[in-house]
Amino acid sequence: MRKPIVSVFGSHDLNEAPEVEALCEDLGRTIVDLGCRVACGGLGGSMAAVCKGARSSKSYQSGDTIGILPMEDADAANPHVDVVIPTGLGLFRNMLVARAGDVCIAVRGGAGTLSEIAFAWQLNKPVATMSGTGGWATKLAGSKLDRREGQEVIDLEDVKAANTWISEVLGL
């Protein structure tokens, strides 16, 4: 049976945000503890932290962290990525990160994260944000991006809420 994938979108720069880095590590660990894999953009900041956390899970297996890179250089991936996909697509790779997830969670984030949220929304993926982390994750929490019936960006207060939401949506 295939392991579900949780795509995590977020800031590549977490300077001066150690609490967000710790949250990302906890989120990655929780995702793998649930029996899922993590997909992300594969670079630094929140992407490195979520992969590092995933690899610290007692349930971790090789292949549980997937990095979908914007460049062609596989060596650009953070050291916690198991499966490196160097696309050479630049920002267009954001669509692939959104497409990869059975569910998608945004942490903090700027314009790149915003595009990933929008792609996931348009692909009818369940989308949530860690609302206390700032950036687009805070701005879009609990909102509707357009007039789609019964769909909103889910507001997750903390990693415990993320655990519950992932479990419910994926039927774990």
Image (cartoon, rainbow, N blue to C red):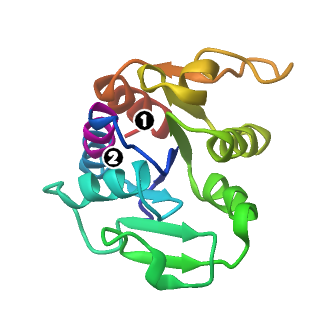
Q: Residues within 10 Å of mark 2 (few under 14, many from 20)?
A: many
N-terminal of the pair, mark 2 or mark 1, is 2
Secondary structure under the numbered disc 2 in the rendered image = helix
Amino acid on which the number 2 mark rests in the picture: Ile
Judged left or right of residue 91, residue 1 is left
Single out the residue that lies furthest toward the top. 142
- Residue at position x 68%, y 41% from top? 111
Disc 2 + disc 1, Cβ < 8 Å? yes
Residue at the spot 72% in from the left edge and 57% down from the top edge:
95
Quarter where residue 114 is shown:
top right
Q: Horizontal and vertical percent for residue 81?
A: 37, 70
**On-image quarter of the C terminus:** top left
Q: Which residue is under mark 1?
A: 166
> Tag 1's secondary structure?
helix
For this view, does 64 lie left or right of residue 84? left
Name above or below for residue 81 compared with residue 132.
below
- Magenta highlight range: 19-25
Foreground residue among 117 and 134: 134
| Amino acid residing under circle 1 | Ile
The residue furthest front is 16
Q: Quadrant of residue 94?
A: bottom right
User: Distance from label 2 to label 1 (Cα)?
Assistant: 8 Å
Which label is found at residue 31? 2
Quick check: is 110 in the magenta stretch?
no
Residue depicted at 31% across the width and 68% down the height = 80
